[in-house]
């Protein structure tokens, strides 16, 4: 049973996050209490407007209830009531949503922190400890299991836990979402490069082969920058190594020759942009990715259609109200004109000829003129009030349209990032998941085996064993398909010394071409891959052209 919460003033981001259907399988709005609006964006906008009337900067409190197993709605509402009681938010406006993400049922609750009677924000001190106590009480009440960190209240002893510093923080979780590489995988790769390198130069080259760039930090001597542009302390990424060990091993490196952390970050972001562009081009041809995009677009069109129907019904109702109001004004004016016409003949005309009644008639005419002016002014006021009400209703629907467009952009971005991260992850880790650099990284693949830590491990003997046991013909065919794929897509192979690809390609040339003694054509193809830029190959005969990967 995990319950967490945070105070925030960014209600627009919170509304998009809560309604994101790309990251969540289902999104269900359970209730909206204490606000005029019945939708999430409107309710949070009202909470933000209340906060604007105070000096508070964070006007809402969002809680996240994640049970280890699905709960009933009554149990969720019991948990919400307990949290309100412990935090002092009972009776405040709130929004309750239920999500299902990767088969995991959880609940989101957003409260307004502003007390309307006092127009002050409710003080939420020690909210993490209070939520922790709520989780313990609810787990005991519902018979749920608690995590190791929630079972016992260790107090200050928890700071002495050696594993505490290894747990991912929120910033590291955000980095995982950007890069697609977990902290455990990053530490394992960098630790492996540390243990297999015998000098500072070899360690730097190993990091570059793995897709990391060694740089000099502002507060630390050495940092590593990953493909997502995130900067990490080098000493913290190496298991079992301390800062003095890292400084001793890398003392032969000249810091003046290393790029600064900001420059390395910009360089890696440029490379990441290139990888993402290549991934987007591949996703355009991916049938599975297209199916997911079309499904999301269909859901967004269905959601927008409901709002379009509301807009159409509003416009028809406004037109009907204006017509009815105009007909009422015209009927009243016709009655007034008919009365004036009756007064202009008959007794009124006779009375005008009598001297002592002339002033009385003039007074009556002036009164009628004032009444006519008053009636016209009254009509204008009614028409103006109706117009303002129509404008407010149109602005409300326009606000919902704007929120829907922001949500659509966020969902498409989330889906695109999720699809691109798969490609970047396979590219970065060198896995053979359809990325052809995995075929060319046989030397690195062998070096990553745990057998390398044995004292009698011979990499050359392992390569020879793989050559004798493996099918050389199939490997040559795979490499030819890789070359054909590179030619067809116009991929350029760079000779940047900090690039990941060049060391892998050189290892392939050295290990496969020279040691394995492959045929001359295969050696020529491998050398062609390692050139500075790949020249477009002349068209080959249709019958002998290699098939594209995956065909």
Image: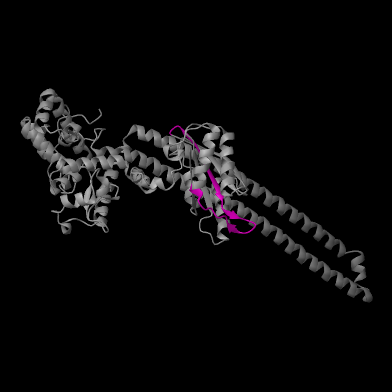
Q: Position of residue 100 (x, y in %)?
A: 48, 35
The residue stretch that appears in magenta: 102-128
Q: Along the line of sight, which residue is nearer the eye, 496 or 145?
A: 145
Which quadrant holds the C terminus? top left
The residue at 81%/57% (across/down) is 335
Tell me: 364 left or right of 536: right
Q: Is residue 107 magenta?
A: yes
Closer to the camera, 136 or 28?
A: 136
Please state if 401 lies on the left or on the right of 354 as rendered.
left
Q: How many marks?
A: 0
> Based on the displayed image, in which of its 4 quarters is residue 292 positioned?
top left
**Residue 381 among magenta residues:** no
Residue 239, position as x, y percentages in the image: 25, 43
Q: Position of residue 340 (x, y in %)?
A: 83, 63
**Vertical order, 428 against 370 (above or below):** above
Residue closer to the observer: 90 or 433: 90
Q: Is residue 517 above or below residue 417?
A: above
Q: Nearer the viewer, residue 269 or 96?
A: 96
């Amino acid at each position: 049973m995990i319950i967490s919460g945070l105070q925030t003033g960014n209600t627009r981001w919170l509304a998009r996050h809560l309604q994101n259907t790309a990251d969540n399988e289902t999104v269900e709005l359970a209730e909206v209490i204490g606000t005029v609006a019945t939708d999430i964006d409107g309710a949070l906008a009202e909470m933000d407007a209340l906060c604007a009337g105070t000096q508070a900067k964070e006007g809402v409190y969002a809680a996240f209830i994640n049970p280890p197993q699905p709960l009933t709605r009554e149990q969720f509402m019991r948990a919400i009531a307990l949290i309100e009681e412990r935090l002092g938010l009972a009776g405040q406006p709130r929004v309750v949503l239920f999500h299902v993400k990767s088969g995991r049922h959880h609940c989101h609750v957003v409260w307004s922190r502003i007390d309307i009677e006092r127009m002050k924000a409710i003080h939420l001190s020690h909210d993490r400890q209070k939520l922790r106590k709520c989780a313990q009480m609810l787990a005991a009440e519902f018979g749920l299991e608690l995590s190791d960190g929630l079972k016992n209240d260790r107090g200050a002893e928890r700071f002495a836990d050696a594993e505490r510093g290894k747990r991912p923080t929120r910033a590291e979780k955000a980095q995982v979402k950007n890069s697609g590489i977990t902290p455990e995988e990053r530490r394992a790769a960098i630790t492996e490069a540390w243990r297999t390198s015998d000098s500072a130069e070899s360690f730097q080259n190993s990091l570059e082969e793995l897709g990391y760039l060694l740089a000099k930090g502002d507060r630390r001597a050495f940092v590593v920058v990953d493909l997502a542009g995130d900067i990490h302390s080098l000493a913290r990424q190496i298991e079992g190594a301390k800062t003095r060990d890292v400084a001793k091993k890398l003392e032969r490196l000249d810091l003046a020759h290393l790029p600064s952390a900001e420059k390395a970050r910009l360089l890696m972001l440029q490379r990441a942009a290139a990888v993402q562009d290549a991934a987007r081009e591949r996703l355009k041809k991916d049938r599975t990715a297209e199916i997911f995009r079309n499904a999301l677009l269909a859901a967004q069109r269905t959601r927008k259609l409901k709002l379009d129907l509301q807009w159409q019904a509003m416009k028809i109702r406004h037109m009907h109200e204006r017509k009815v109001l105009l007909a009422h004004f015209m009927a009243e004016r016709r009655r007034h004109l008919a009365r004036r016409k009756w007064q202009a003949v008959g007794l009124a005309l006779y009375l005008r000829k009598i001297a002592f009644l002339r002033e009385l008639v003039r007074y009556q005419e002036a009164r009628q003129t004032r009444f006519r002016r008053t009636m016209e002014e009254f009509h204008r006021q009614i028409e103006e009030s109706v117009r303002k009400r129509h404008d407010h209703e149109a602005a409300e629907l326009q606000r919902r349209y704007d929120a829907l467009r922001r949500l659509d952009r966020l969902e498409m971005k989330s889906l695109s990032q999720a699809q691109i991260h798969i490609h970047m992850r396979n590219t970065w880790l060198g896995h053979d998941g359809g990325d052809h650099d995995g075929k060319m990284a046989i030397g690195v693949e062998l070096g990553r085996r745990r057998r390398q830590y044995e004292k009698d491990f011979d990499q050359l003997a392992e390569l020879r064993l793989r050559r004798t046991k493996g099918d050389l013909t199939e490997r040559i065919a795979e490499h030819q398909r890789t070359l054909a794929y590179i030619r067809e897509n116009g991929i350029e192979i760079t000779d940047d010394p900090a690039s990941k690809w060049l060391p892998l390609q050189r290892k392939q040339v050295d290990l496969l071409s020279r040691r394995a003694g492959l045929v001359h054509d295969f050696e020529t193809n491998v050398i062609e891959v390692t050139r500075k830029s790949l020249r477009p190959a002349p068209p080959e005969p249709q019958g002998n052209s290699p098939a594209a990967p995956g065909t």
